[in-house]
Image (spheres, grey):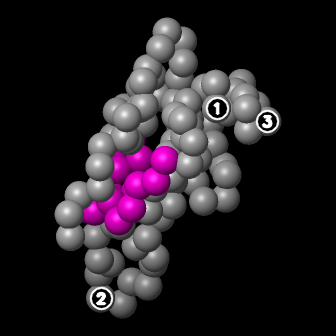
Amino acid sequence: MTAPPEAQGTDGPDLRWYVYDRHATLLHVAGTLSDAETWAVAHWGVVEVGDREEVADNDYWYLLLAAMPDKGDYHSRDFQARIVRHDRVIALGRNPQATPRYPS
């Protein structure tokens, strides 16, 4: 499988990136897109990015795959994340001042 193309988000002054899970729960806020992606990969123990789609400018959806669970451990290994820049958070009607579940 080939790696998905790199996200092309641009960072501007004071434009933070918000990491949401598949339930639209705010998990983390990062200073750059790269930091947000790195946090998501570490948080879920990702071994492969199954898919990355640009929903809109500065708004990315990810299918993330974690390592196979141990035998007898029946946890899901696929996770969905949406990483969104501050201006897009406002456009979506979400609260940019919300407290993330996992603050820095």
Residue that label 1 marks: 88
Quarter of the image holding residue 8? top left
Q: Residue at x 64, y 25 (%)?
A: 87
State yes or no: residue 50 in magenta.
yes
- Horizontal side of 61 relative to 69 (left or right) equals right
Is residue 18 placed above or below 24 in the rendered structure? above
Residue that label 2 marks: 71
Q: Residue at x 32, y 78 (%)?
A: 69
Q: Residues within 10 Å of mark 1 (few under 14, many from 20)?
A: some
Residue 45 percent coordinates (x, y): 33, 58
Quadrant placement of the N terminus: bottom left
Q: Indicate which disc, 2 or 1, sits on the residue closer to the N terminus.
A: 2
Residue 48 percent coordinates (x, y): 28, 62
Q: Residues within 10 Å of mark 2 (few under 14, many from 20)?
A: few
Residue 10 percent coordinates (x, y): 42, 24
Residue that label 3 marks: 93
Q: Residues within 10 Å of mark 3 (few under 14, many from 20)?
A: few
Q: Indicate which disc, 2 or 3, sits on the residue closer to the N terminus.
A: 2
Visible residue check, residue 62: yes
Task: Tell me the kind of residue under disc 3.
Answer: Gly
Residue 7 percent coordinates (x, y): 37, 41
Task: Tell me the kind of residue under disc 2.
Answer: Lys
- Horizontal side of 23 relative to 7 (left or right) equals right
- Horizontal side of 80 relative to 46 (left or right) equals right
Kind of element beneath mark 3 = loop
